[in-house]
């Protein structure tokens, strides 16, 4: 999965640069190229086998942080859907939503370009072939192949266009609430896409590629395959929004973001924790 490959990227850098401190990898600079990396994805979601990104847990900062250089592109990748045939349903669903969020965030990114857009549109078409299968949990070898291809295309998209606010806001949900990365993204996608639809026609193009006529059909599908989200209290919303506010990912967003908006997105995406009776 993505965590294993990302850890390998970090180790490839550290083994070639013995003086580096692992805690400071996201902001470190170094001269010696990383050791060659061979990626073997065993989930269909992260696309890390075709990106330079490695996402690491930052315990001191209580979040997840990414680093990348041109040295951390894998030299080779074995992308075989047979590695995912025995993947349990929750991991299949969560990683599928991660792949979709890569396609969507990259497509709507300010950094997108004609090449990344064509890859994203192809990815939406492939993902569309999996929608009914994900709803019914009918995970045939052909569906596994389509999910792996969608993940691969999503990785190629974000390698060029980056991710945006969904990823930035999802990281504190993973760190503090223990939500798998793709699941955290899934809870936030509706709020992100609704805001994006107000500022760019590309949301409509995305829906057409997915064979949906309305955004509510897409967000309804995502909601239907997800388990109920955890509740957040007001303090958690404020803390998580503050943690996410400094992320560089927001620069890729199709609309401006501030801490108050991030707090509102959390409230739109997850239920409020009931107030305790005194």
Image (cartoon, rainbow, N blue to C red):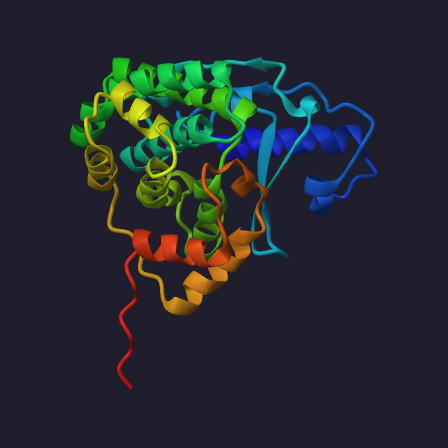
Q: Which residue corresponds to the image point at 74% horizontal and 34% vertical from the top-left?
A: 14
Figure quadrant of residue 151? top left
- The answer to whether residue 41 is visible is no
Q: Residue furthest left?
A: 136
Q: Is residue 149 left or right of residue 136?
A: right
Q: Is residue 164 left or right of residue 18?
A: left
Q: Is residue 158 above or below residue 180?
A: above
Q: Which residue corresponds to the image point at 73% horizontal and 24% vertical from the top-left?
A: 34
Q: Is residue 72 left or right of residue 107?
A: right
Q: Is residue 101 left or right of residue 48?
A: left
- The answer to whether residue 266 is visible is yes
Q: Is residue 8 above or below residue 263?
A: above
Q: How many marks?
A: 0
Figure quadrant of residue 54? top right
- Residue 106: give x, y in percent of width and height: 46, 28
- Residue 44: give x, y in percent of width and height: 39, 25
Q: Residue furthest bottom?
A: 278
In the rendered image, the quadrant that contains the C terminus is: bottom left
Q: Nearer the viewer, residue 80 or 63?
A: 63
- Residue 112: give x, y in percent of width and height: 50, 24
Q: Which residue corresponds to the image point at 50% horizontal and 34% vertical from the top-left?
A: 163
Figure quadrant of residue 141? top left
- Residue 48: give x, y in percent of width and height: 52, 26
């Amino acid at each position: 999965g993505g965590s294993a490959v990302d850890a390998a990227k970090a180790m490839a850098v550290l083994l070639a640069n013995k003086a580096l401190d692992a805690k400071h990898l996201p902001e470190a600079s170094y001269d010696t190229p990383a050791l060659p990396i061979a990626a073997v994805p065993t989930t269909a979601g992260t696309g890390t086998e075709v990106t330079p990104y490695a996402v690491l847990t930052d315990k001191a900062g209580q979040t997840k942080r990414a680093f990348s250089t041109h040295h951390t592109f894998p030299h080779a990748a074995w992308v075989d859907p047979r590695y995912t045939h025995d993947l349990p349903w929750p991991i299949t669903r969560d990683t599928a939503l991660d792949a979709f969020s890569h396609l969507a965030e990259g497509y709507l990114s300010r950094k997108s370009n004609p090449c990344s857009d064509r890859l994203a549109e192809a990815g939406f078409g492939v993902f569309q072939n999996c929608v009914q299968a994900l709803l019914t949990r009918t995970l045939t070898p052909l569906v596994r192949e389509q999910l792996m291809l969608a993940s691969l295309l999503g990785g190629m998209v974000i390698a060029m266009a980056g991710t945006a606010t969904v990823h930035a806001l999802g990281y504190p949900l993973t760190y503090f609430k223990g939500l798998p990365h793709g699941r955290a993204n899934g809870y936030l996608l509706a709020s992100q896409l609704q805001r994006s639809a107000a500022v760019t026609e590309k949301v409509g193009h995305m829906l057409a590629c997915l064979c949906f006529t309305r955004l509510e059909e897409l967000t309804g599908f995502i909601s239907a395959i997800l388990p109920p989200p955890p509740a957040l209290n007001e303090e958690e919303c404020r803390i998580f929004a503050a943690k996410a506010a400094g992320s560089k990912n927001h620069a890729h967003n199709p609309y401006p973001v501030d801490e108050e908006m991030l707090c509102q997105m959390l409230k739109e995406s997850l239920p409020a924790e009931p107030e305790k009776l005194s």
